[in-house]
Amino acid sequence: MAAKLRALAISQYGCIDFTSVTEGDKEIAISYWQSTQQIKAWKQDPQHLLAQHLGHSKWYKSYQVEIVKIEREYGKSVPSSVNQTTSTRCETMTNLKIRVYKNGATDPATTVTIPGGVLKIASKLIPTKAAASLHEKGIDLEEIIKLAENPDAHGTLIEVEEHQDNEKIVIALE
């Protein structure tokens, strides 16, 4: 349902981009729009209304919606123009891909994609135990975030082989 609604929001209501990240029972969804009028129209779409009802009654124990206006943005990989469009900004961001291979398979059993635009937020959703495990393996999330801000940074950053679990984890910027 989420993919269908995302496509509908983009194709019929003018949504520029939509990204969501889930970690355990937490989810962050960010959508970019040109106007509040587009957001209001999307909020009244019958399929979106159904999803809202399901969200309230079944999917979420609690939720929070914030509508914000980006007045200024900056970063190493973002051009300095304040009038830059969100779609251009999103095209220059690097995604973080985490792939888990099991039992020597050539295709990953699990792939997690974290868009560069939400990487800083998503990194805060990582459970303490998982973050500690990454740190023990020498994986510095802050450094990965800094690398992801550079649109020219691509490729495999880390490969971790867990021989005891017959598992390989590959972290890459794409």
Image (cartoon, rainbow, N blue to C red):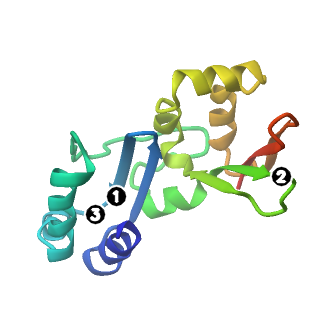
How many neighbours does mark 1 have within 10 angstroms: few (below 14), some (14-19), or many (20 or more)? many
Q: Which of marks 3 and 2 is nearer the N terminus?
A: 3
Q: Distance between the residues labelled 3 and 2?
A: 46 Å
The label number, if any, that marks residue 32 in the structure image: 1
SS of the residue under disc 3: loop
The picture places residue 166, in percent across and down from the top left corner, at 84, 43
How many neighbours does mark 2 have within 10 angstroms: few (below 14), some (14-19), or many (20 or more)? few
The answer to whether residue 10 is above or below residue 22 is below
The picture places residue 83, in percent across and down from the top left corner, at 39, 55
Residue at point 61% right, 24% down?
131
Asked if the residues shown at circle 3 and circle 2 are in contact, with their CB atoms under 8 angstroms apart, the answer is: no
The answer to whether residue 17 is above or below residue 20 is below
* Kind of residue sitting beneath label 3: Gln
Residue at point 74% right, 27% down?
139
* Kind of residue sitting beneath label 1: Tyr
Q: In which quarter of the image is residue 70?
A: top left
Of residue 157 and residue 90, the one placed in the foreground of this image is 157
Q: Mark 2 points at which residue?
A: 103
66 sits to left or right of 7: left
Q: Name the residue under label 3.
A: 34
Q: In which quarter of the image is residue 109?
A: bottom right
